[in-house]
Image (cartoon, rainbow, N blue to C red):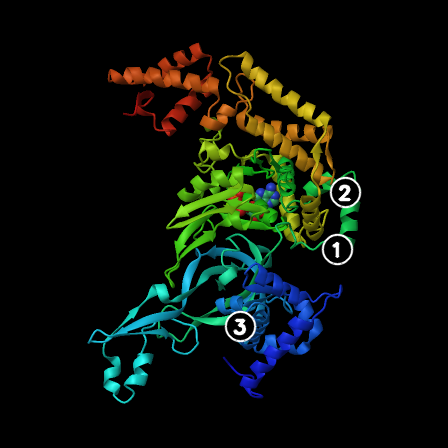
Amino acid sequence: MPSSGQGNPESMVVDYVTLFQDFLQSFTDERGERKYMNRIREMVFYEGKSIAIDFEDLARFSDELVLALDRESQKALEALSVAIKSIVESINESYASRVRRFYGRLTGWVKPTPIRELRSDLLNRLVLLEGIVVRATPPKQRMVRATYVHVLPDGSQHEFAWPPDERELEELEKPSYCPVCVAEVSEEVGSLRRGAFRLVLEKSTFMDWQMISLQERPEDIPPGQLPRSVDVVLTEDLVDVVRPGDRVSLIGIVKLLRGGRKTSSVFDFYIEANNVIPAQRLLEEVNIGPEDEAKIKELARDPLVRRKLVASIAPAIHGYWDLKEAIALLLFGGVPKVLKDGTRIRGEIHVLIIGDPGTAKSQLLQYAARIAPRGLYTTGRGSSAAGLTAAVIRDKQSGEFFLEAGAMVLADGGVVAIDEIDKMRDEDRVAIHEAMEQGTVTISKAGIHARLSARASVLAAGNPKRGRYVDSLGLAGNINLPVTILSRFDLIFIIKDVADVSRDRQIVRHVLEVHGTEGVRAEIEPDLLRKYIAYARKYVRPRLTREAREIIERYYIELRKRSAMDPNAPLAITTRQLEALVRLAEAHAKVALKEEVDAEDALEAIRLMNAVLEKVGMDVETGLMDIDTLMTGKAKSLRDKEVTILEYIRDASRKGECVKYGELEKLGQGLGLDRPALERIIADLRKSGDIYEKRPGCYMVVE
Ligand code: ADP
Ligand code: MG
């Protein structure tokens, strides 16, 4: 602890105590109430250990106290603690004697320090940090004072507390001498170490303790940099008040933590917390002033607002209107509902893009993450050990088990863009189901049991399994993701890189224009767009009108009916799509800051859903929408024929014969398959490893 170098430190501590006592006893608020005396009385009544101290009150009361907290943070905080205790003593002496220590917890500080700007000149000083809790150990017990028994060779014992002065224990070390015998055998140094020391856990003093890691908020990280974080120690009533994924303001003293090797002279920072204040779950971090609000309202009145908005999503990327509209709707989101029985229906809209390489998927994702309030870009592998959901990991240095938040938890309340989602870890494959539908991540491992909040909208992209999208394989056959995850996306887009001269020419022009100039100007400036989205997410909660309800109902019933008429028809549409339609319609209304979801919104949601369903699921043979295609990758009628062909080849194979192409052609004709369709089926069966070409033009089943 460095001293200020001026004055007598001892008397200064005393001075601080008197100053703080004075503050606590005499500070009166605007209503003339003795605010802090009331807080202390309340604390005693509820048997608490701490009171909140509002920084603004301190600053108004005395510069000296602020200066003391800034220059000699540790000493000043200790003085504050002593001052509180002395007042408690005058209120309830027996309670004061039972509590080892009281705390004054600051609710603000001069100004926040960015985590990446922690430097040695801030050592031992009070700082205010803002960030996200990324990991936390479970609550533990830290020994503050140990009780030992000195057992002498003759069997007699001395019990004593360690350390012998009133200090707190830094590390658990064996006593270097017995404070009891020192007095008894003060001359005979040799006998001091005789006997053995035994730690008596039951008689030692403990306090609640927890270590967390605080990371920069994604929006504070400079472009292209990795997030920085700092460890924080929480004690007593600060333990277990925050969870991984929480955004917090944190006030504490910067201290040093020795690195891995004991002999190393290199240290890490850590923060000893004085207070930790969870931030509001709403989007406080986007600052919307009165001028912004006027601009937002004006934009909302523009009849072309939706057009302009969609055009402002990644303006450097040519085309993809429907996809950009879907991304816009995802950014605004639907309205979450909590049913009477406590079930939650999500408002988050999830969108998946499966596309050939080089079709600007990554670009779109990065743009969306940048524009979204609380946006986060990551890959399927995740950016940390915790991956996409959460994990229990062991810290290499301290050996402690931590619960660490993954991308979806960190983006809680915002948007997570997951590139190359098909490369997701196995653990995430399991946990992401719950995260996408319920908005929670439950983890139970290595003695840590927790449920974290993960209400993030997912914009994901994946590459086709075989490099390029193969139509005949259907959706599920093209991407390395289980159907259960696919079905949680509200909309799925397929981007194929087909050569199309006029389209290619347009892209070339567009790309060259982007490269030639400063870039294209968006219709709506990114900054305003972000504020507009944040405003809509925070204040607009549109409700379905009767009209909209009827339109959605009719569309849904019609599709269900069509599948009911034909007993062989695949199930056309499920309640998942129904909920998705409602969300999309709500989001569409939100884009214009409307409080009501009307016919226009419902129709646009249906148009978008139809466009997507046709691309991914339309059964070309029966003209029916076929969600079955999603599940197995084949429309039902086509799949039936494929099975017939496979069984025919299998029968022949059992007799040890292969089936000639001519024979299959005849069979195909009987099934109503033309040549290209038959060839596609044969190609698919070969690709899936069901059959092989034994001799040219003769096929057999692989056993
Ligand atoms: P993916 O992630 O789909 O493999 P990328 O996002 O990495 O593709 O895109 C590759 C490059 O091609 C990017 O520089 C992107 O800007 C460009 N590009 C691809 N399609 C378009 C398009 N339609 N308009 C403008 N640029 C495009
Ligand atoms: Mg990519």
Most distant residue in the top direction = 670
Q: Secondary structure at mark 1?
A: loop
Q: Is residue 111 shown to the viewer in this render?
A: yes
Q: Disc 1 vs disc 2: which is toward the camera?
A: 1
Mark 1 or mark 2: whose residue is earlier in sequence: 1
In the image, the residue with mark 3 has its CB under 8 Å from the nearest atom of ligand 2: no
Q: Amino acid at mark 2?
A: Ala
CA separation in Å, label 1 and label 3: 33 Å
> Label 3's element?
loop
Q: Which residue is mark 3?
A: 119
Q: CA distance from mark 1 to mark 2?
A: 16 Å
Residue 187: x %, y % from top left: 27, 89
Indicate which disc, 2 or 3, sits on the residue closer to the N terminus: 3
> Quick check: can you spot residue 230?
no
Dot 1 alpha-carbon crowd within 10 angstroms: few under 14, some 14 to 19, many 20 or more: few
Q: Is residue 490 left or right of residue 163?
A: right
Q: Residue at left 56%, top 67%?
A: 92
Ligand 1, image quadrant it occupies = top right
Name the secondary structure under disc 2.
helix
Q: Establish if 146 lies above or below 644.
A: below
**Which image quadrant: the C terminus?**
top left
Q: Which amino acid type corresponds to the residue marked 3 in the rendered image?
A: Arg
> Image quarter for residue 150?
bottom left
For image coordinates 66% across by 25% down, the residue present is: 552
Residue identifier under label 2: 300
